[in-house]
Amino acid sequence: MPELTSHQKRILRYTSGALGVLGFYIFLVYTYFHFESFGSGQSEIGLGEAAWYVFLNPTGLGDTGTKLFPATVPGKLIGVVFALSGLSLIGLFVGKVTDMFNEYREHRKLGHYGTDIENHVVIIGWDRFSRKVVRQLILSGVSVAVVTDVKEEVDLIYEEFSGEEDVFVLYADYEEYDQFALANIDSAQQVFLNRRADTDTLITLLNFHNHFEDLDLKYVVRVKNEELIEAFEVEDIRVEAVSTFDVASALISSHIFEPDVATFGKDLIASAATEDDYEIQQFLVTDENPWAGSSFGKLYWELYENYEIIPIGLGKREKGSRELLELPEDDAPVEVGDYVIMIVSGDSAMSAEKTFGVKEGGYF
């Protein structure tokens, strides 16, 4: 016989307790009926009145037209049991309802009831770096599911992003892959891995590829030791390893001798928070795009003159590989499947989405 699950054991325990209480009350009904109908020589106490007294009188719901008090000593003792047990049951019921409500809130906070968000980014691992990534994704209108194996971090995440409907938090063991269905990983766009150690990140990447190979997910991983970048170049896995050391050192060196350029570059990388902010975005060229099949020069001048958008590059995709054309020649072809990289403001970004017919972002 297979072993019962914890949920099944809990149901069995509650069912047994309910049957035990019901049996106890049935016993009291017949005992009270026996003493009051025969022990006192009174015949007006029937089985129905006895049941009425047992179940309703202790709660104050008895009818004034019904005998509400026992006449025999054993009946009075049973009446005391009725009253005490009735109050105890009420207290037990209220306590159980409160516990169930608190348990529901706890499981909901921990994400154990799942989410139905789609086209989102699943972030595995939480720290200050993940927090900044989530903040930028929210500004870009991207939904996020954060998975952490530290229970205390759940409250910190909700405090940081209180009121954000696009942030879902799941407390789960990283090795329990079935639990990632609660984060709706089947409908995710990308997975961002940010474990505490690079070795843990690499192991998680390989395990995820084995368990979710059918999903054909794209992974972005944070690598803290730039010497391990090559270890993340795994065949058949769509992964982009980013060394925070390389990015940070480039910005710091730029701040040293080109502080204004560095400041402007950081503003362009960050998502636009207001209509006057500028940022770099990329948009997919679809079959319905008005510039599909035309030249980069034609696209450049029409976007600039009509929307004050400045295209600065083309991203080519072919068989899983990428090629970035920085400031292409005017006669460079714009093909379906390309990504147009452009500088937009918070206001013109909306025009770009409407014109291109897609939301910003690129996934190879």
Image: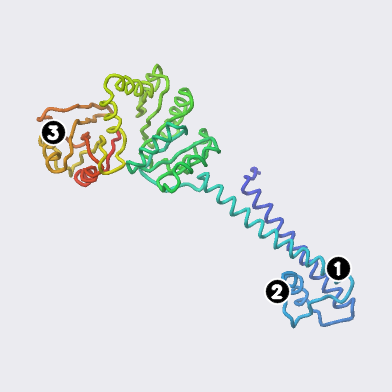
Q: Quadrant of residue 55?
A: bottom right
Mark 2 and mark 3: Cα distance apart in space: 83 Å
Indicate the quadrant containing the N terminus: top left, top right, bottom left or bottom right: top right
Mark 3 and mark 1: Cα distance apart in space: 95 Å
Residue 206, placed above or below residue 56: above
Proximity of marks 2 and 3: CB atoms separated by less than 8 Å: no
Residue under the point 89% across and 72% down = 73
Q: At which x and y percent is residue 88? A: 74, 61
Total marks in image: 3
Proximity of marks 1 and 2: CB atoms separated by less than 8 Å: no
Q: Which residue is mark 2?
A: 61
User: What is the secondary structure assignment of the residue under circle 1?
Assistant: helix
User: What is the secondary structure assignment of the residue under circle 2?
Assistant: loop
Q: Which mark is residue 290?
A: none
Q: Nearer the viewer, residue 223 or 43?
A: 223
Task: Indicate left or right for 61 with 252 as reference.
Answer: right
Q: Amino acid at mark 1?
A: Leu
Q: Earlier in the sequence, mark 2 or mark 3?
A: 2
Task: Indicate left or right for 23 with 269 as reference.
Answer: right
- Label 2 crowding class (10 Å Cα cut-off): few <14, some 14-19, many 20+? few
Q: At which x and y percent is residue 303? A: 15, 40
Residue 166, placed above or below residue 228: below
Q: At which x and y percent is residue 145? A: 43, 41
Q: Which mark is residue 296?
A: 3
Q: Which residue is mark 1?
A: 77
Indicate the quadrant containing the C terminus: top left, top right, bottom left or bottom right: top left
User: What is the secondary structure assignment of the residue under circle 3?
Assistant: helix
Q: Nearer the viewer, residue 228 or 158?
A: 158
Q: Amino acid at mark 2?
A: Leu
Mark 1 and mark 2: Cα distance apart in space: 20 Å
- Label 1 crowding class (10 Å Cα cut-off): few <14, some 14-19, many 20+? few
Task: Indicate left or right for 248 with 97 as reference.
Answer: left
